[in-house]
Image: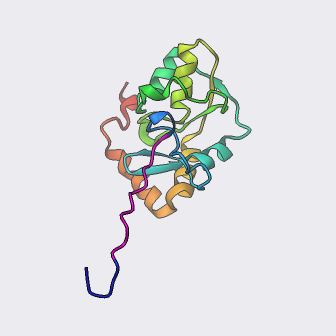
Amino acid sequence: MTPGHAQAPFMPKPRFAHHNNCPRCPIIGAEDIPGDEYFELWGMRFSIAIARKIAAGHPLIPATPENFLQWLGWAHIEKQHLDHVPTNQGFGVVITLPFGIGTPMIDGNHRVLVAVIDRKPFSVVVLSEQESLDLLRRSMGAESADELWQDMHSHPSANQNESR
């Protein structure tokens, strides 16, 4: 402590906690802080808000065991989130990656799993490859998006469907 300066009283650091102690739930007190939710994959960031705008008005596709497994193969599921995930937030959104790489679900992963467990219907909108690229461009900028999209050409799963 320097002369002439009073020592500040001890101030504990604020403690942040997630609702339900679940890492997928919002931080308590942060519900009023605006911010987009994103799905991240291989350095790409897909805005969920923009995805839902693009998906609006598209036909809904019911989830089946076959497509459900295909979509969820890309997801990280937090098991503790399943018992309290809100199931009334509408359809899920699936994107189409280039070069036949796959179709990951970017919104609704936990909701579709709960629906399957509870044997309830769940539907998604599947964005085309072009719509998925447009989403990525709007989410993170055209230059970065185009570079990452083209880099997927060298992905091990690229063009697997062409050789079958």
**Picture quarter containing residue 84?**
top right
Magenta region, mostly helix, strand or loop? loop
Taking depth in this image into account, of 81 and 93 the one nearest to the observer is: 81
Q: In this rendering, does residue 84 appear at all?
A: yes
Q: Is residue 124 above or below residue 133?
A: above
The quarter in which the C terminus is drawn is: top left
Q: In this rendering, does residue 64 appear at all?
A: no
| Residue in the picture at 55% in, 51% down | 30
Taking depth in this image into account, of 116 and 124 the one nearest to the observer is: 116
**Picture quarter containing residue 154?**
top left
| Residue in the picture at 59% in, 39% down | 127
As for residue 152 lying within the magenta part, the answer is: no
Which residues are the magenta region?
A: 7-18
As for residue 13 lying within the magenta part, the answer is: yes
Taking depth in this image into account, of 108 and 8 the one nearest to the observer is: 8
Furthest-bottom residue in this view: 4
Figure coloring: rainbow
Furthest-top residue in this view: 119
| Residue in the picture at 33% in, 75% down | 7
Task: Give coordinates of residue 60: x percent, y percent.
Answer: 68, 28
Q: Is residue 117 above or below residue 152?
A: above
Q: Is residue 65 above or below residue 94?
A: above
Task: Give coordinates of residue 137: x percent, y percent.
Answer: 53, 56
Task: Give coordinates of residue 1: x percent, y percent.
Answer: 25, 79
Question: Is 159 on the left-hand or right-hand side of 83?
Answer: left
All told, the count of numbered labels is 0
